[in-house]
């Protein structure tokens, strides 16, 4: 019987610990913090990717790297419908930039 009391005490303690952790998780607003961190990270990655693609566009030797990064983003990170719209927009912007460079130089 003494072993059974030890098991009951362990179950009771585990339940108390679980309840405490869940209450603190809720009280500290961990879900909101995690959501904000995810949102901020995604917002920070978009300008970084745009900067990297912009820099790669300026160097003629890196067209293959630029194309691979662009296709990776379009395949993995975006839905099919959104990626098609974005692809059209990027192509239009790239061709406009190319025309401007040709006109300047």
Image (cartoon, rainbow, N blue to C red):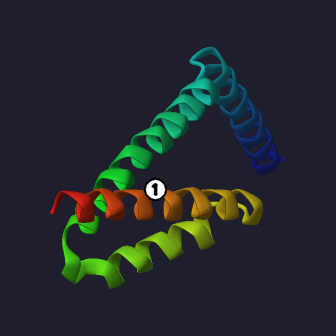
Residue at the spot x=33%, y=49% of the render? Answer: 48
Q: Position of residue 64 (x, y in %)?
A: 34, 84
Q: Judge left or right: residue 15 versus residue 50.
A: right
Q: Position of residue 80 (x, y in %)?
A: 74, 66
Q: Position of residue 42 (x, y in %)?
A: 49, 44
- Above or below — where is 75 with respect to 19? below
Residue at the spot x=59%, y=64% of the render? Answer: 87
Image quarter in which the C terminus is found = bottom left
- Above or below — where is 91 with respect to 12? below
Residue at the spot x=35%, y=57% of the render? Answer: 97
Residue at the spot x=61%, y=73% of the render? Answer: 75
Check disc 1 and report its element: helix, strand or loop. helix
Q: Judge left or right: residue 36 versus residue 16.
A: left
Residue positioned most to the top: 27
- Residue bearing the label numbered 1: 93
- Above or below — where is 15 with respect to 68? above
């Amino acid at each position: 019987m003494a072993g059974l009391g030890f098991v009951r005490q362990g179950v009771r303690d585990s339940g108390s610990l679980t309840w405490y952790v869940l209450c603190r998780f809720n009280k500290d607003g961990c879900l909101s913090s995690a959501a904000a961190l995810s949102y901020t990270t995604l917002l920070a990655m978009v300008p970084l990717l745009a900067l990297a693609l912009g820099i790669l566009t300026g160097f003629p030797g890196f067209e293959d790297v630029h194309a691979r990064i662009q296709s990776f983003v379009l395949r993995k990170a975006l839905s099919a419908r959104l990626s098609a719209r974005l692809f059209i927009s990027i192509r239009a912007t790239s061709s406009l930039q190319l025309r401007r460079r040709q006109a300047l130089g």
